[in-house]
Amino acid sequence: MELSVSDLAVSLGNRRVLSHVTAAFQPGRVTAILGANGSGKSTLVKTLAGLLDADAGHVKLGTRHIARIEPRERARLIGYLPQDPIVHWNLAVRDLVALGRLPHRSPFAGASQDDAMAIGAALAATDTHALADRGADQLSGGERARVLLARVLAGEPQWLLADEPLASLDPVHQLGLLDQLRALAATGMGVVIVLHDLIQAARAADDVLLLKAGEVVAFGPASQALAHQPLRDAFGVEVMIVPDEQGRLLPVPIGRTR
Amino acid sequence: MNRPLLLILLTALVALLFAGSLVAGKIWVPPSVWFTGDPRWWIVAELRLPRAILGLAIGAALGLTGAVLQGYLRNPLADPAVVGVSSSAALGAVAAIVVFAANAPLVIFGAAMLAACGSMLLLAGLAWRADSQVAFILAGTVLASLAGALTAFLISIAPNPFATAEIIDWIMGALTDRSFAEVQLASPFIAIGCALLLFTGRALDALTLGEAAARSLGVRLARTQLLIVLGAGLAVGASVAVTGVVGFVGLIVPHLLRPLTGAKPSALLLPSALGGAVLVLAADSLVRLGPGAAEIRLGVAMALLGTPFFFLLLLKMRRSAWS
């Protein structure tokens, strides 16, 4: 099911953060949202996840308005990975990943066979099986990122919305996580991620949405959106387009636009 | 620790201490004379039984509320005092004593519950739709300060030294001389409050990941907040209304049990209710055993016993963090 926004406007307090945003995100593809700091990327992802109300316009999953979907059902359809990898208590990794099953469980119900299988699959997909009995406090940054991704995957959502999942990861783990997101999209899941790095976006994303001051500068296939003019408009930077070994065109920032 | 085993152990401990609470006191009443014509049996039936029931109920209420609030606020320092309900209930009781010169348990209870419910509604109103723990803590702290100031004001205008003595005596918290009248008054509110609080487990677990992630997992934070405000208001309000202020239980019990239950907030709720009952029953039995005719006040004893114990615990935690 397509996840779409139409003429969306969102405010935080009295400040208008997003205006006239229109875009349709496709399942089975990785869409990267990019933009300068404060351009409204996180706000857009939270609104897509149904966590913020729109002032105007709407967010739809297929033909249904996201605001009218009951929160638990919405949680089963859309998995959201927040920007800060917070874990407030020192939960064991297995319990942490099991939190992803909450929308599937009725109050006071214990874990079902389905829950156990989904948790096992999520641990396997993120290669975190070996960490299952460790406490969250004993994880490195990379391990924690993988475990929190496993938490979202355990919910078996149709959409995965991740806000800056690469922040605080070293290059190896960044590449690993991006490969994982691509693999998930290949299974038919819709993946929307907020990124900062133009090169990572060019490598991992099928589509790119560029935001500037809350408005869409460009939205389309990565090769078109990550071109000279849109990047000049969105970031005020000049880029050199360099092909990588697989022929993908990578935009390397080389200076500010004069 | 294995959860069923922990629950069985705690339940057994509650049963043991409940029986101990009927036996222990200035006059020991062994089980052999229970249900007989022995005059000592009436001490159990009329004085110690209601006292033990109340000890169990308020211990459970305070322990459970502490565990819920620590989970909700994601702060191991939270306790029922944070939401200001204890101070508000105390204010209600003090107002009844000073303004209406009341000394009937029903009037004092009614005033305390009224104040607890009023503060609860105010808290819900102040923090409503903020969906945020910061608004909740601020609103609770402001209410607690206001109630504290008004209580101090009422004490200062108390009409005579007897009223002042009665207020201070009441505020210190005790289970002494409580009857079945108080049990009947408080237990329904405590039971309903605890039941509401037990419904928060899933939301508390989800909040481990922060508010945004919890909402993305389908948790309605406003509803969770309402459950907590109502549950804590009823359970703690009714507890304070019959015993005065008994601190420390809500803070210390979840701390003691967390190493045994694991860190998952929902796993801590039922054990904390049982653990609270264990602590209050034990402390209330101990205060009766002191020398002299008078008893140490339960609230005072709890702080006196609890503080060094808590410091030891802190020291142990720091040592394990260092090693």
Image: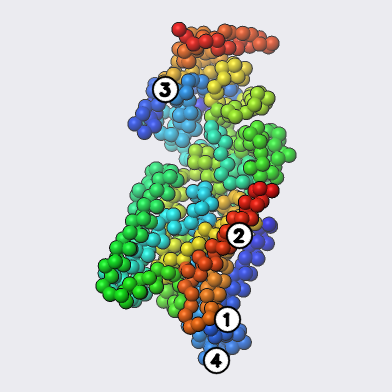
Label 4 to label 2: alpha-carbon separation: 44 Å
Residue at image location 61% in from the left, 8% down from the top: A242
Label 3 to label 4: alpha-carbon separation: 83 Å
On screen, residue A258 above or below A79 = above
* Whether marks 2 and 1 lie on the same chain: yes
Name which residue type carries label 1: Val
- Tell me if mark 3 has few (under 14), some (14-19) or many (20+) residues whose alpha carbon lies within 10 angstroms of its own: many
* Left or right position of A252 against B225: right
- Asked if labels 2 and 4 touch by Cβ distance under 8 angstroms, the answer is no
Name which residue type carries label 2: Leu
- Tell me if mark 1 has few (under 14), some (14-19) or many (20+) residues whose alpha carbon lies within 10 angstroms of its own: many
- Sequence-first tag of 2 and 1: 1
The residue labelled by disc 1 is: B23
Q: Tell me the SS state at disc 3.
A: loop
Name which residue type carries label 3: Gly
In x, y percent, where is residue B63?
52, 61
Chain for numbered disc 1: B
* Left or right position of B289 against A55: right
Badge number at residue B312 = 2
The residue labelled by disc 4 is: B38
- Sequence-first tag of 4 and 2: 4
The image quarter containing residue A240 is: top right
